[in-house]
Image (cartoon, grey):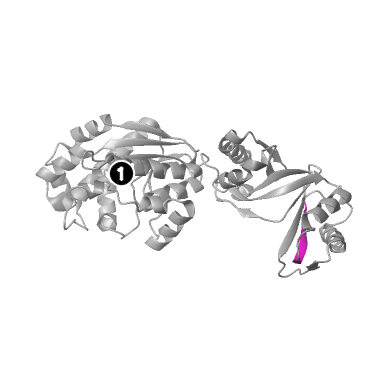
Amino acid sequence: MKKVILIRFGEIFLKGKNRGFFEKTLVTNIRESLNSFGAIVEKIPGRYIVKDYNEDDEFEIVDRLKKIAGIFSFSVAYCVPTSLEEIEKISVELMKDLSGTFKVETNRADKHTLELNSIQISAKIGGNVLKNNKNLKVDVKNPKYILNIDIRENKETYLYEENILGVGGMPVSTSGNGLLLLSGGIDSPVAGYMMAKRGVKVASVHFHSYPYTSNFAREKVEKLAKIISGYTGKMTIYMVSMTELQEQIHEKCNDSYMITLLRRGMFTVAEKICKKYGKKMIITGESLGQVASQTIESMTVVSNVVKSTPIIRPLVAFDKCETIDIAKKIGTFETSIEPFEDCCTVFLPENPVTRPQLDKVLVEQNKIDFDDIIERAMQSIEIVEINQD
């Protein structure tokens, strides 16, 4: 008997002739995530298994697997050769100290090695467990314990009690790559997680206004990126200074257009980064109507500067409570609410325009050397690499 972790995938089953690409990417992502543990990741028909790991690392390995997109569920299991004798022996061992109700569920992918069908195997194993533990009784509708028996085509059987849910979705890197506008708030880290779950390899850009924003704000963003990297893998952050743009807008433009013009600058820089570094999409945490810069008019005017790169807004129809629930689930919420400012809070106008018109925005933008300032912002880029622990 050996202990392994049995991994199941979900949406990949829906793929046709290119299913192999998705499976190969998933197993690569699992291996990279577990590389430091020295575990072996192996494909068997319809499953992956993690084996030959130090059981002292099991808790941390389980935590890593919970964050890998493409995994539907997994179980810590005991692996035995497929024979009734071996299955009975381990079943009795696993259930010997339990009391209460139980049932046995059998999945028989291998329909040839054993003569009994799934129902017959469950009945036989369950009866044997009862003979050896008088503190248990069968309840097929609402049992306290479920003994799962998974008989696979590789002539091995896996016995386990718990199904642990994974992220689901598609393996990271199967849907291209994108650039996340990562602020220090609640929304953008969730947007990055949502796109990683759909198979996007996520890098990020963070806009700062040093010295108006502090190093604490930068550290907060790097901390958020570290948390997200558990789901995305290694993450690159492009740190960009927007100080000159904000100073020029504040000095020469109507203050009510500060946020609109600043965000046009951000999206212009984001598209340039995408083109320079081969990113296929811009990702934002915008939610329709949430704040003044996220009305449909504001989003339209800001998006106008992006010429050929798709803008993806995975949270556009979410309310704040939905986003907060996900932020808590993925572990970013507590960091996101730490009180350090980002560049959008610098020179914040009292009455920002909520329904800007493009012609009026362009009048304000033409009061400054917008293109030259953007080029200097591009020259300020600092690249920071965030590695998964």
- The residue located at (58%, 44%) in the rendering is 60
Residue corresponding to mark 1: 217
- The residue located at (37%, 53%) in the rendering is 186
Name the side, left or right, on which 116 lies relative to 285.
right
Quadrant of res 139: bottom right
User: What percent of the width, then of the height, locates residue 128?
Assistant: 87, 60
Q: Viewer-proximal residue, 53 or 141?
A: 53
Q: Viewer-proximal residue, 113 or 310?
A: 113
Name the side, left or right, on which 330 lies relative to 143.
left
Q: Is residue 107 magenta?
A: yes
- What segment carries the magenta color? 100-108
Three-letter amino acid code at disc 1? Ala
Q: Viewer-proximal residue, 105 or 63?
A: 63
For the N terminus, the quadrant is: top right
Q: Is residue 313 visible?
A: no
Is the magenta region chiefly helix, strand or loop?
strand
- Mark 1 lies on a secondary structure that is helix
Q: Residue reaching furthest top? A: 379
Q: Is residue 132 visible?
A: yes
Name the side, left or right, on which 352 lies relative to 149.
left
Quadrant of res 119: bottom right
Instruction: Categorize mark 1 by other alpha carbons within 10 Å: few (<14), some (14-19), many (20+).
Output: many
User: What percent of the width, then of the height, locates residue 228?
Assistant: 45, 45
Q: Is residue 321 magenta?
A: no
User: What percent of the width, then of the height, locates residue 108?
Assistant: 79, 53
Quadrant of res 177: top left
Q: How many marks?
A: 1
Name the side, left or right, on which 169 lies relative to 257.
right
User: What percent of the width, then of the height, locates residue 317?
Assistant: 39, 59
